[in-house]
Image (spheres, helix red, strand yellow):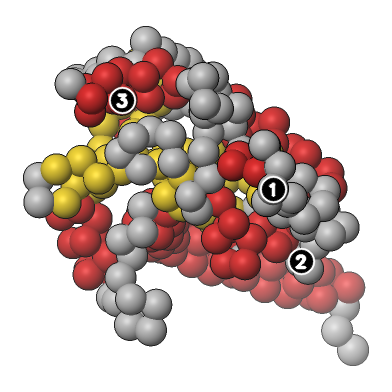
């Protein structure tokens, strides 16, 4: 019969070996996981800006990277809306740096064709992360995506589905007097005959708190970029 000390020693040895194996696997996979996260973010930026390729054609990671480098110009702006040439989006540490915001500009034939900005905030159960894209007029929504969240599947989790995100396309973030009104997700189906329909989208049944949170953080993120939108629109008109 094995002694208790033998059993304890064997268990301890197995635990140590498994711990080393798991730690080594996590370390070896860390770089790959980071690359996959970065690629997923780039895919979402491309999708929001409507340049992610054909839906029925699967692209490789290298093809997505090439598409991003060819069609996206990224830079940083300050709280006044002006570019900060000595910074790149990856230089921004949101925990320690405030007043700096990344911009992802869609470029076609060396001409600006739209802008994507990151959006994030609290839903019901989690923090939601995504991108909102505007046409070159800085007023009309081109697209929206969500790439990370922990909302309930079938309820708040529907925010990432095409049927929901497609409702944003063509909506306006300014009213006729050029006042920022953001995009509001309503509890009901949007009344297209109403005066507010131009900045409203249909809600998600059973996800009131998730969409309420979205209404708050989308507006706040747009406010942060408001000086940039005004400068870009003036440049466009000029």
Q: Position of residue 172 (x, y in %)?
A: 51, 38
- Mark nearest the camera among 1 and 3 is 1
Q: Position of residue 42 (x, y in %)?
A: 36, 54
* The quarter of the displayed image where residue 114 is located: top left
Of all residues, the one furthest to the bottom in this rendering is 1
The residue carrying pointer 1 sits among few (fewer than 14), some (14 to 19) or many (20 or more) residues within 10 Å by Cα, namely few
Q: Position of residue 76 (x, y in %)?
A: 30, 26
Name the residue located 40 percent from the left edge and 16 percent from the top edge: 227
Task: Tell me which numbered mark, 2 or 1, is placed earlier along the sequence.
Answer: 2
* Pointers 2 and 1 in contact (C-beta within 8 Å): no
Q: Position of residue 81 (x, y in %)?
A: 34, 16
Tell me the SS state at disc 1.
Answer: loop
Q: CA distance from mark 2 to mark 1?
A: 32 Å
**182 and 210: which is toward the camera:** 182
- Mark nearest the camera among 2 and 3 is 3
Q: CA distance from mark 2 to mark 3?
A: 39 Å
Q: Is residue 229 left or right of residue 223?
A: left
Disc ID at residue 193: 1
Disc ID at residue 35: none
Q: Which quarter of the rendered picture does the N terminus lie within?
A: bottom right
* The quarter of the displayed image where residue 124 is located: top right
Q: Which quarter of the rendered picture does the C terminus lie within?
A: top left
Of all residues, the one furthest to the left in this rendering is 110
| Residue denoted by label 2 | 153
| Residue denoted by label 3 | 233
**201 and 48: which is toward the camera:** 201
């Amino acid at each position: 019969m094995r002694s208790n000390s033998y059993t304890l020693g064997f268990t301890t040895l197995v635990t140590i070996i498994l711990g080393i194996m798991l730690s080594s696997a996590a370390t070896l996979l860390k770089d790959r996981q980071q690359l996959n996260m970065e690629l997923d973010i780039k895919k979402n930026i491309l999708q929001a800006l409507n340049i992610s390729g054909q839906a029925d054609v699967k692209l490789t990671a290298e093809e997505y990277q090439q598409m991003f480098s060819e069609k996206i110009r990224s830079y940083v702006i300050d709280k006044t809306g002006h570019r900060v040439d000595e910074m790149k989006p990856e230089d921004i540490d949101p925990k320690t740096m405030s007043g700096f915001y990344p911009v992802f500009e869609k470029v076609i034939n060396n001409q600006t064709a739209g802008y994507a900005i990151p959006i994030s905030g609290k839903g019901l159960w989690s923090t939601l992360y995504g991108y909102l894209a505007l046409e070159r007029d800085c007023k009309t929504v081109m697209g929206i995506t969500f790439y990370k969240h922990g909302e309930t599947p079938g309820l708040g989790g529907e925010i990432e589905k095409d049927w929901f995100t497609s409702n944003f396309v063509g909506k306006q973030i300014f009213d006729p007097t050029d006042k920022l009104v953001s995009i509001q997700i309503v509890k009901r189906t949007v009344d297209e005959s109403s005066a507010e329909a131009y900045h409203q989208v249909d809600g998600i049944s059973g996800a009131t708190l998730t969409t309420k949170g979205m209404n708050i953080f989308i507006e706040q993120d747009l406010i942060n970029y408001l000086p940039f939108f005004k400068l870009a629109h003036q440049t466009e008109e000029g």
